[in-house]
Amino acid sequence: MKNYENVVIFDHPLIKHKVAILRSKDTDMKTFRELVEEITTLMTYEALKDVPTEKIIVETPLETVEQTVVKDDSVVIVPILRAGLGMVNGVHVLFPTAKVGHIGMYRNEETLEPVVYYCKLPVGIEEKMAIVVDPMLATGGSACDAIDLLKKNGCKKIKLMSILGAPEGVEKVATTHPDVNVYVSTLDRQLNEHGYILPGLGDAGDRLFGTK
Ligand code: PRP
Ligand code: URA
């Protein structure tokens, strides 16, 4: 895959280690859920380094000093249901007061086209940094439609975080939405004929919620 200015693929041994365990078919649901959260937190640390900040005055026991803090209520987490829910806590670890907007979407298994069935976003989201989370970026259809929906709702600053990405999906989001920063923990090889990521980890929603 060629390099895109708006795409970051992580190359960190801690993430690689956790992704290796996540992929295994022998990893149980609880461990899978915990790993998704941990990888998300590691990604958030890097992906949100341009989060809005403000200056405050702090009195230490010795002096008064100006300090930088993260601006309150500046980030909204937007999971794509269902599997995106598994990443919400991983962002909340670092941004505990972030509001959450939900976009319900599933892929039609025949056409692989996303179908929107729910959308509830916090009031004022157009002024915030919206972080779309979905562990799997396969064809990129779901992510592109979710980003379109956010843009229609006035969002100007949007980031996407996915744990695994197929080259097809990463390229689709990177080119359809060049203004969106895309963070993928690991770039996988390809999609199979059913739109599953290879080598992948299977169906993220089913593995997170025990539905298969
Ligand atoms: C999965 C995944 C993404 C989508 C990715 O959701 O969580 O939302 O597929 O595929 P795409 O890039 O080709 O659009 P799924 O439809 O399995 O729904 P679920 O999260 O409810 O299991
Ligand atoms: N959705 C998943 O859960 N897994 C894939 O490999 C592709 C889409």
Image (spheres, rainbow, N blue to C red):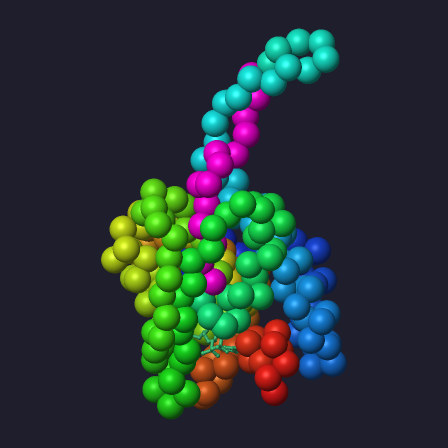
Q: Is residue 210 left or right of residue 3?
A: right
Q: Residue at 25%, 57% (x, y): give it.
A: 152
The segment highlighted magenta reads 66-79
Q: Is residue 167 left or right of residue 180?
A: right
Asked if residue 9 lies in the magenta stretch, the reply is no
Camera-nearest residue between 123 and 166: 123
Residue 187 visible in the shown view:
no
Q: Majority secondary structure of the magenta segment?
A: strand
How many labels sit on residues? 0
Asked if residue 70 lies in the magenta stretch, the reply is yes
* Vertical position of residue 158 compared to residue 79: above or below: above
On the image, the x and y values in percent for residue 59 come to 64, 15
Q: Which corner quadrant holds the N terminus?
A: bottom left
On the image, the x and y values in percent for residue 148 come to 29, 62
Q: Is residue 31 left or right of residue 6?
A: right
Q: Which corner quadrant holds the C terminus?
A: bottom right
* Vertical position of residue 148 compared to residue 57: above or below: below
Q: Residue at 41%, 78% (x, y): give it.
A: 106
Q: Residue at 54%, 26% (x, y): give it.
A: 68
User: In terms of image quadrants, where is residue 95?
Assistant: top right
Residue 195 visible in the shown view:
yes
On the image, the x and y values in percent for residue 53 come to 48, 31
Q: Residue at 62%, 49% (x, y): give it.
A: 93
Residue at the far top: name it: 63
